[in-house]
Image (cartoon, rainbow, N blue to C red):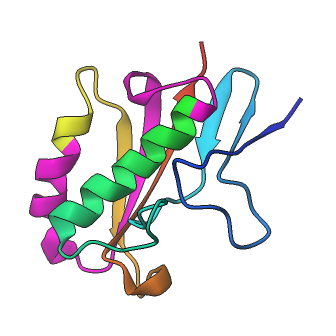
Amino acid sequence: MKKEIVTEKAPEAIGPYSQGVSMCKLVFTSGQIPVDPATGEIPEGIEKQTARSLENVKAVLEAGGSGMDKVLKVTVCLSDMNDFAAMNGVYSGFFTKPYPARTCFQAAALPKGVLVEIEAVASAE
């Protein structure tokens, strides 16, 4: 049975979607942009925005009974592929081997003009 994941530790969904959903022992996060859920602020720079987005991903995963160590697949959207190395430097601090599979691409535009949006699929086992 599909179950909605809701947490105050990540930005609330502002449209017809959930912060995350779980089903069949898998947790799927929606794309997380770097909005601080406590203040609504967006940090400056790709490094801080990557860290905030990943903290939001982590919060949704934990609310769904999973964690960063159980992530199977990550999708990263960048507003500029020139930010890849800086994003990757921060990203590498959130994961350990075996690393999750990952796709990264440049999007024409991201919500609220942010530099990065990140989503993940993880096991809940």
Q: Where is residue 115 in the image (x, y as percent from the top left)?
A: 30, 76
Furthest residue in direction front, as rendered: 39
Left or right position of 53 against 26: left
Q: Where is residue 91 in the image (x, y as percent from the top left)?
A: 22, 46
Furthest residue in direction top, as rendered: 125
Give the quadrant of residue 49: bottom left
Residue 79 magenta: yes
Q: Residue at x 37, y 37 (%)?
A: 101
Which sits in the foreground, 102 or 40? Answer: 40
| Quadrant in the picture for the N terminus | top right
Is residue 47 depicted above or below 60 in this figure? below
Which sits in the foreground, 27 or 61? Answer: 61
Q: Which residue is drawn at 33% across and 57% down?
A: 52
Which sits in the foreground, 73 or 110? Answer: 110
Q: Which residue is drawn at 63% across and 45% down?
A: 7
Q: Please give the range of residues in magenta.
A: 63-91
Residue 119 magenta: no
| Quadrant in the picture for the C terminus | top right
Q: Position of residue 46 (x, y in %)?
A: 19, 69
Furthest residue in direction right, as rendered: 1
Is residue 96 depicted above or below 80 in this figure? above
Left or right position of 113 against 48: right
Q: Where is residue 35 in the image (x, y as percent from the top left)?
A: 43, 67
| Picture mark count | 0
